[in-house]
Amino acid sequence: MQKLYAAGLHTAIPGIVLMSVLTGFESPLTEISAQEDRGGGAVRLAISRGTAEARNFFTSFLDFTKYTLSFTPLEGQPVREDLPWQGESSQEIYLPLGNWTIRATAYITVNGTDRPAAYGETGVDVGSAYSYADIEIDAPVEGETGTFEYSVKAPAQAAVSGTLEKMGDPGVPHTIAAAGSGTISNAASGIYLLKLKASFNGKTVNRTEIAYIYGNSVTRGDYVVTKADFGEPLILSGSIRLTDDGASGSESYSIAVYTDENYTNPIGYIPILLTDTAWSLALPPVQRVKRLYFRVNANGWCSAQAGDIAVPPEDTANIGLGTVAFINLSGTVKVPAEPAPGNLSVTAYTGKYTNWLQDGFVQASGEWAMKIPAPQNRTEVSFILRAGSIDFYETAVSRSVYNQAEGSINLTLEKTETGDIWIDKTFVKAGDYGRFGSALFIPGEKGVLVPEVRETSGSLIYLKLYDVLTGDLAANNAGSGAVRIEYTLEAGLLYAVTVGVYTGNPDLESYRMRAAFSAGR
């Protein structure tokens, strides 16, 4: 016999997630089967809002208010209809072994009455082995009525018409006579095909969308037909205010347009000057794009976000990108060896080295500079010195910046005579693959470097010695426990020492790793 435990109702907008476990049998529904010696199985049942194609138009109601379950054997009538799924309480249901169809129905409350709105169902084979069953609730319950609200945007000269036809229903479809907004009330619940036709400059575009109309709720559909759908470019123009405090005067700037919020798919680009206040560009015909994202680039490698807009149906002016501001940061790196090593760089971060801002190369003179987007508020920026692409030294230098250039940010590499160099790492959480801490230094005299790693808590330790000018000197995957390597270093050269830790204890909450490096003759 079989138990169903309903372990919590967790709502989310616009969907729900429910989890339960079907375990051993001991429920009294003996009218289903008297063969209790057939044993039982376990089923993990999940119920969620359906994930149909993104193009589908879904209802705008925020949440279901009630859910029921029913169970039907492979051949026969449902065992029990409308079994309530009760929030965080548990309930036991008897189901014999065999193939079952589990149906979940979602309700919304209308004038104090629960009305069925959507359902989903899945099949499950209840046996001795543990199994899983997922139910996606997205199909409209038939026999109810709902509302379809729509808007259609198109070029002003385009002729637009359309129909809303219920799938499998030969009745008269609802009509859309022109572009604009409208409401279709008392539409029978079900799945519909929304067919649109737009004509412009002798060309015709046909679009078909799927609309789910649920009972006692509103489904919203917004559709845009642009010039690009007819194979014509889209011309955009507007205003901008560009500032760059501390600029050298040799910078180049540009506005770039992207089709995604991650700025990976550029479709338009135009160079601008620091003194420009207006811009205009023509975008190629790109279809099925809903929003456009703007970015301003400085020198090709520093960029700042400049807002986004919904794709307009036709050429559009007066798009204000607002003020886009950059600031310049600069300083020097002082090293005992002159000139400074050529592969040193400075990296700026916010959030304690978690949010990368920009990199700046250190010149042979020790000077460095970088350009960053001006923060929206006064922000603490921290700096590290990087040797190559891996090893780095976390400096104690930081600077509070806002909308003005900051200079004289000076970083120093100290000579190390004898004694200890400490790396005090941040907390490492269980499950992290690896965390690293590094020290960058120049020995004041020839000596022996003796690294020792403590407080490992059984995790795997990796240690690496690196001559910044010539490459790797030594590396050791030492496993758990302390690490000890002796290596003779020349005076006056730039070295990096890196300690890595790989968490090896899944029950470890957190710990602090510290490494000491003793250098002596």
Image (cartoon, rainbow, N blue to C red):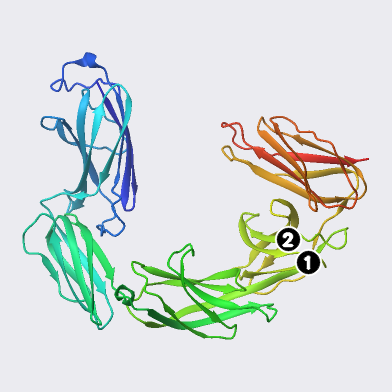
Does residue 503 appear left or right of residue 115 in this picture? right
| Front residue (pair 469, 186) | 469
Q: Quadrant of residue 170?
A: bottom left
Element type at marker 2?
strand
The image shows residue 440, relative to residue 9, as above or below, that is below
Return the residue at label 2: 345
Element type at marker 1?
loop
Residue at image location 70% in from the left, 33% down from the top: 456
Q: Position of residue 6 (x, y in %)?
A: 30, 34
Q: Quadrant of the N terminus?
A: top left
Q: Quadrant of residue 432?
A: top right
Residue at image location 20% in from the left, 51% down from the top: 109
Q: Position of residue 413 (x, y in %)?
A: 82, 56
- Mark 1 Cα-neighbour bin, 10 Å: few <14, some 14–19, many ≥20: some
Return the residue at label 1: 363
Q: CA distance from mark 1 to mark 2?
A: 9 Å
Which comes before the other along the chain, label 1 or label 2?
2
Is residue 390 in sight in this rendering?
Answer: yes
Does residue 1 appear left or right of residue 501 in this picture? left
| Front residue (pair 484, 65) | 484
Q: Position of residue 190 (x, y in %)?
A: 15, 54
Residue at image location 61% in from the left, 68% down from the top: 301
Does residue 76 appear left or right of residue 432 in this picture? left
Q: Amino acid at mark 2?
A: Ser
Q: Position of residue 431 (x, y in %)?
A: 56, 38
Q: Quadrant of the C terminus?
A: top right
- Mark 2 Cα-neighbour bin, 10 Å: few <14, some 14–19, many ≥20: many
Does residue 259 appear left or right of residue 66 in this picture? right
Q: Amino acid at mark 1?
A: Gln
Is residue 376 in sight in this rendering?
Answer: no
